Image: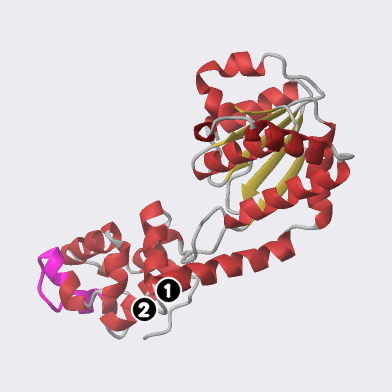
């Protein structure tokens, strides 16, 4: 049998055939799951050699799981990897998925295709009204607090810098980690807290959301559609897809959202952003070159 439902997971297959598996099969499976990239590209003999078992053992494992032979099983593993099967949910597996896909047409071309696909999905997921909601809240804010974790931290820092240059009182809280209490002491209803979270929300993100709600501040959040929810729920949320499994999980998509928000903000704040940017340009021109 070569046809296995594409939504099946390896865990499902193992559970379904548990009474047929041997100790040798267990050794093979341990090797397979430890290195998903190699599992998706090696043949049965190579996998068996790495597991220290008979060369035909991988074929027998595949057959016990319902495949005609190891090539069909390997095709299943590859599809499970690149299509986001839950067997391969770690960061290393996501990287392996991208490498598997890259073999199909070159590494750079694969990255570019993934970015384009993600941006096309963004067009369908986020509207100009969503962008305007964010820019309105920022325009009205007395002070803007930003916090991101992991890859989102670099985006949070960049947004804080751009808002400052546009004349807004923006503070990247990750840069004030050692003095968070002092930075947030004056948090008030007139303020905005903007959270960035692309995986499971960090404890600091959840704590800040809770604090902001308790102080009646407005909470904005930019998250990945696959991310666990932030609770308490943000007042305004934009969820995006940064790429399917096998596509780059980069900052291109959330950065596009940020660019749209800041551009829209400049269009509705009665020249505040433009005047601040011009003032900043003139000030920088007076500074020594190595200060810029």
Horizontal arrangement in the rendering, residue 43 relative to residue 271 (left or right): left
Q: Residue furthest right?
A: 270
Horizontal arrangement in the rendering, residue 131 relative to residue 70 (left or right): right
Mark 2 is surrounded, within 10 Å at the Cα level, by few (under 14), some (14 to 19) or many (20 or more) other residues, namely: some
Q: Name the disc covering residue 75, or none.
A: 2
Residue 233 in sight in this render: no
Which one is nearer the viewer's eye here, 187 or 282?
A: 282
Q: Where is residue 100 in the image (x, y as percent from the top left)?
A: 37, 71
Residue displayed at 56% across by 47% down: 198
Q: Is residue 60 above or below residue 28?
A: below
Helix or strand or loop: what does disc 1 sit on? helix
Instruction: Check residue 52 for magenta coloring.
Output: yes
Q: In which quarter of the image is the C terminus?
A: top right
Horizontal arrangement in the rendering, residue 132 relative to residue 56 (left or right): right
**Quarter residue 277 falls in:** top right
Q: Is residue 223 above or below residue 44?
A: above
Q: In which quarter of the image is the N terminus?
A: bottom left
Which segment is the magenta one?
A: 48-61
Q: Please, which colouring scheme is shown?
A: secondary structure
Which one is nearer the viewer's eye here, 101 or 73?
A: 101
Residue occupied by mark 1: 79
Helix or strand or loop: what does disc 2 sit on? helix
Q: Name the disc covering residue 65, or none.
A: none
Residue displayed at 68% across by 31% down: 283
Instruction: Check residue 198 for magenta coloring.
Output: no
Residue 263 in sight in this render: yes
Residue displayed at 79% across by 39% down: 273
Q: Position of residue 279 (x, y in %)?
A: 75, 33
Which one is nearer the viewer's eye here, 88 or 189?
A: 189
Residue displayed at 27% across by 67% down: 38
């Amino acid at each position: 049998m070569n046809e296995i439902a594409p939504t099946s997971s390896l865990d499902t297959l193992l559970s379904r055939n548990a009474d047929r598996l041997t100790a040798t099969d267990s050794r093979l499976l341990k090797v397979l799951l430890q290195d998903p990239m190699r599992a998706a590209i090696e043949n049965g003999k190579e996998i068996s050699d790495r597991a220290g078992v008979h060369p035909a053992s991988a074929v027998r494992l595949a057959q016990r799981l319902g495949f005609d032979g190891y090539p069909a099983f390997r095709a299943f593993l590859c599809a499970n990897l690149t299509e986001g099967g839950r067997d391969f949910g770690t960061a290393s597996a996501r990287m392996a998925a991208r490498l598997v896909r890259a073999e199909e047409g070159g590494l750079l071309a694969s990255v570019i295709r993934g970015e384009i696909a993600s941006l096309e999905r963004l067009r369908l997921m986020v509207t100009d009204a969503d962008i305007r909601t964010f820019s309105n809240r920022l325009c009205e804010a007395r002070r803007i607090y930003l916090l991101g974790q992991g890859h989102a931290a670099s985006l949070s820092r960049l947004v804080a810098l751009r808002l400052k240059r546009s004349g807004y009182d923006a503070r990247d809280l990750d840069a004030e980690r050692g003095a968070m209490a002092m930075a947030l002491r004056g948090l008030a209803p007139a303020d905005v807290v903007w959270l960035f979270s692309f995986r499971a929300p960090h404890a600091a993100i959840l704590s800040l959301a809770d604090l902001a709600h308790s102080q009646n501040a407005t909470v904005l959040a930019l998250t990945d559609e696959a991310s666990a929810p932030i609770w308490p729920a943000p007042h305004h949320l934009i969820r995006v897809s940064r790429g399917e499994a096998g596509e780059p999980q980069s900052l291109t998509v959330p950065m596009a959202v940020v660019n749209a928000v800041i551009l829209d903000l400049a269009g509705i704040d009665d020249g505040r952003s433009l005047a601040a940017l011009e003032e900043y340009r003139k000030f920088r021109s007076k500074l020594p070159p190595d200060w810029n």
